[in-house]
Amino acid sequence: MEFNIRLLNDSDYDNTLVKWWSDWDWTAPGKESLPLGGTGGFMVSKGDVDICAGFAYFTNSNIAWCEFIISNKEYKDKDRNDAIEYLINSLSKSCENAGYKVIFTSVSHQNLINKYQNCGFIKTQEGATEMIKFL
């Protein structure tokens, strides 16, 4: 069976994504911090099982940002990595189709770094400190 991909909808955040972030011991980003209030990304599924989701931030420059890749921890099929790479490639294609020339992401987990590299991303730096300021 092949993967299906769709745009995230209003109920995905509360009904699916928050649980997935909790399952992986991550704090869910606030809906207001996600593109289009949580609908600015894609969900990959197989049959009726949701596997992974991620977001694309579009800027007013030629740089887009892909972030908050999250997956269903309970999905154990061998094609899990393929599904995540399918998501990354789909996010990349949506950025390209929107006219962006560069896609940035910030990743710390080696498995996800490997998946991004498999999708053509280039590692530019290691050991950077991410910083954020809440206003």
Image (spheres, rainbow, N blue to C red):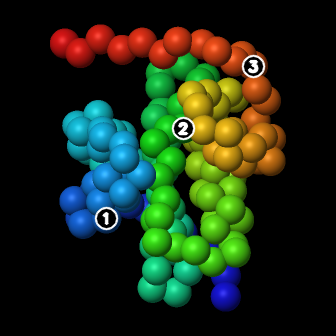
Q: CA distance from mark 3 to mark 2?
A: 15 Å
**Which quarter shows the N terminus?**
bottom right
Q: For this view, does 11 lie left or right of residue 2?
A: left
| Residue holding disc 3 | 124
CA–CA distance in space, label 1 to label 2? 19 Å
Specify few, some or many for label 3: CA neighbours under 10 Å numbering under 14, 14-19, or 20 or more: few
Q: Secondary structure at mark 2?
A: strand
Nearest to viewer (mark 1 / mark 2)? 1
Q: Tell me: residue 86, above or below residue 38.
A: below
Helix, strand or loop at label 3? It is: loop
Q: Amino acid at mark 1?
A: Thr
Kind of residue sitting beneath label 2: Cys
Give the spatial CA distance, label 1 vs label 3. 32 Å
* Displayed quadrant of residue 29: top left
Residue name at image x 47 percent, y 21 percent:
60
Q: Is residue 2 above or below residue 87?
A: below
Q: Position of residue 125 (x, y in %)?
A: 72, 16
89 or 77: which is nearer to us? 77
In x, y percent, where is residue 131?
42, 12
Residue 112 quadrant = top right
Residue beneath label 1, please? 16
Question: Is mark 3 in CB contact (under 8 Å) with mark 2?
Answer: no
- The local secondary structure at tag 1 comes to helix
Residue at 63% from the left image edge and 77% from the top image edge: 77
Q: Residue at x 80, y 47 (%)?
A: 118
Q: Is residue 46 above or below residue 95?
A: below
Amino acid type, mark 3: Thr
Disc nearer the start of the sequence (3/2): 2
Which sits earlier in the primary sequence, circle 1 or circle 2?
1
Q: Which residue is mark 2?
A: 66
